[in-house]
Amino acid sequence: MGAVICDVSFQPRCNYEATLRPRLLRLQTSWPDASTVRGFQARLATDDLAVAMKFNHAQKVATARAITDLLAVNGVDTRDDLHTWLDHQANRATLRTVKGVGPKSIDYMSNLVGRSQVAVDVHLRTFAADAGVQDRRYEQVRAAYEEAAALLGHDRAGLEHAVWRYTSGSA
């Protein structure tokens, strides 16, 4: 869960493959007790997340701490707990109260715990615009991808990831 929380908190405007992914893998190895929210919260009380992540960005660290505290208060401890908790729109709205967490972060977090969502980022927006999608609002772009996935018989998250890899140059 520590890696899930950090992935969501640190990934905005970050080169995932070159910058974030190696740090997340290192965090999982160096903080094995952070596999639950409680374990991650305990580690945050004794260790410096910016040092552990080798990522000195105060707002991203604050976002990770706030998500951790919010999940802990709501009894979310494991990936399965989070998967179930995200079923409820009220819980998603509660997550939106955390500074730095928007609809894309919530959809991305959902994917990380095994849900199939389209997390619209700059790469997906660019691809959609190039394909002629006129309405650029988050919900409308997400709906266009969801409809395309359904028409093509693809998993929503799988289509999103394929487009992301293509447009980000990771393909």
Image (cartoon, rainbow, N blue to C red):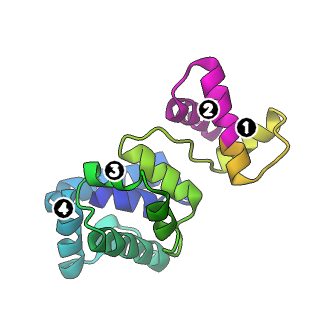
The amino acid beneath tag 4 is Trp
The residue carrying mark 4 is 31
Residue at the image position 46 percent from the left and 72 percent from the top: 60
Q: Quadrant of residue 164?
A: top right
Residue 48 in percent (x, y) is at: 27, 77
Vertical placement of residue 68 versus 6, above or below: below
User: Looking at the image, is mark 2 or mark 3 earlier in the sequence?
Assistant: 3
The amino acid beneath tag 1 is Phe
User: Looking at the image, is mark 1 or mark 4 earlier in the sequence?
Assistant: 4
Viewer-nearest of discs 1 and 4: 1
Vertical placement of residue 78 versus 90, above or below: above
Mark seen at residue 84: 3
Mark seen at residue 127: 1
Residue 42 in percent (x, y) is at: 17, 74
Q: Label 3 crowding class (10 Å Cα cut-off): few <14, some 14-19, many 20+?
A: some
In 3D space, how far apart are the residues under numbered discs 1 and 3 (Cα atoms)? 31 Å
Is 122 positioned to the left or the right of 101 in the image?
A: right
- Disc 4 element: loop
The amino acid beneath tag 3 is Thr
In 3D space, how far apart are the residues under numbered discs 2 and 1 (Cα atoms)? 9 Å
User: Looking at the image, is mark 2 or mark 1 earlier in the sequence?
Assistant: 1
The amino acid beneath tag 2 is Tyr
- In the image, 53 versus 114, the foreground residue is 114
- In the image, 121 versus 96, the foreground residue is 96
- Disc 3 element: helix
The residue carrying mark 2 is 166
In 3D space, how far apart are the residues under numbered discs 4 and 2 (Cα atoms)? 32 Å
